[in-house]
Amino acid sequence: MRKKYGILAYPAGHSLSPVMQNAAFQAAGLEADYVLFERRPEELEGFMQEMRDGLAWGVSVSLPHKVEVMKYLDWISDEARIIGAVNTVVRTEEGKLHGYNTDWMGAQWALLDALGEKDLDARAVVILGAGGSARAVAYACLEAGADVWVKNRTRSKADGIAIDLAEHFEEEIHSVDFSDMGTGDILINTTSVWLGKESWQETLLVEYCDPEYLKSFELVMDIVYRPLITPLLEAAMDSGVPVVTGEKMLMYQGAKQFELWTGKEAPVEEMWEALKELL
Ligand code: ATR
């Protein structure tokens, strides 16, 4: 019987995961389909029971369920607990539901891919934003040996990330004011300013989108993939600094999900080809 997987989100229609994961199943020769499980918050509990009963063998969890879903799981990985969010659920043969976070792995893999031999050890990473994505990205950097500076419009949220993660790592994590234009080796945007209603020129990000400022970084990454080349990446490219686009993190977090669900190595090339066609 074909196995079912899917994305649990609301709304789910704009997700790129179905095309990417179905391409992976096909490339790996697996009898499996990845579908949309569009569920509102009030439908979450019922869905998790259906999953336990065999509706699906695994789901990607997206907004708005990444935190709430943790209530309905039998086991949660240490990383997901520390980050405070689950983006992957695996159903075991016994009908148990296990939660993981692959966002941090996706961010780390994308960064290491771009950095090559230089890797992240002892590097200084500046992270813009302090939402759920920033937590996963900060975790990824600390886990690979980097020191982290988190800057956010709402300073208290940056303070919260620094306090929560500091106790788990020997590496340093600090929170600083968004207006502090101190530099580092790597700059990563996790804010959603490009997606907001106001023009980005009206936001705090405008100071950062300056080729002169960005020159001092070795690498600039944005986790947003629509647009693929964000104003920040455009400015970095203008100053000749290498960039990492958001779909790299999307692909690698999906590749890790595929591995957790199937126990097989992800066919990354095919996933990449499928994603590229969509963007
Ligand atoms: P995610 O889960 O993807 O991280 P989120 O939790 O909604 O999304 O976080 C969005 C991030 O973008 C936050 O850091 C937010 O800053 P605040 O904590 O101050 O709200 C940031 N952000 C959104 N719009 C912004 C803007 N116009 N200027 C600066 N930061 C902005």
Image (cartoon, rainbow, N blue to C red):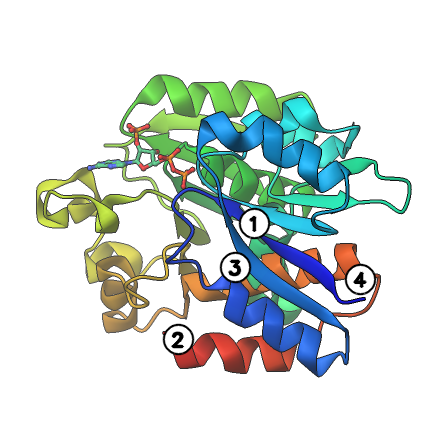
Q: Earlier in the sequence, mark 4 or mark 2?
A: 4
Q: Nearer the viewer, mark 2 or mark 3?
A: 2
Mark number for residue 249?
3
Q: Are marks 4 and 2 in contact (CB under 8 Å)?
A: no
On the image, the x and y values in percent for residue 48 come to: 66, 34
| Residue located beneath label 4 in the image | 262
Quarter of the figure with residue 192: top left
Q: CA distance from mark 2 to mark 3?
A: 15 Å
Quadrant in which the C terminus appears: bottom left
On the image, the x and y values in percent for residue 255 come to: 66, 64
Element under disc 4: helix
| Residue located beneath label 1 in the image | 123
Of 267 and 73, which appears nearest the observer? 73
Q: Residues within 10 Å of mark 1 (few under 14, many from 20)?
A: some
The amino acid beneath tag 2 is Leu
Q: Nearer the viewer, mark 2 or mark 1?
A: 2
Q: CA distance from mark 3 to mark 4?
A: 20 Å
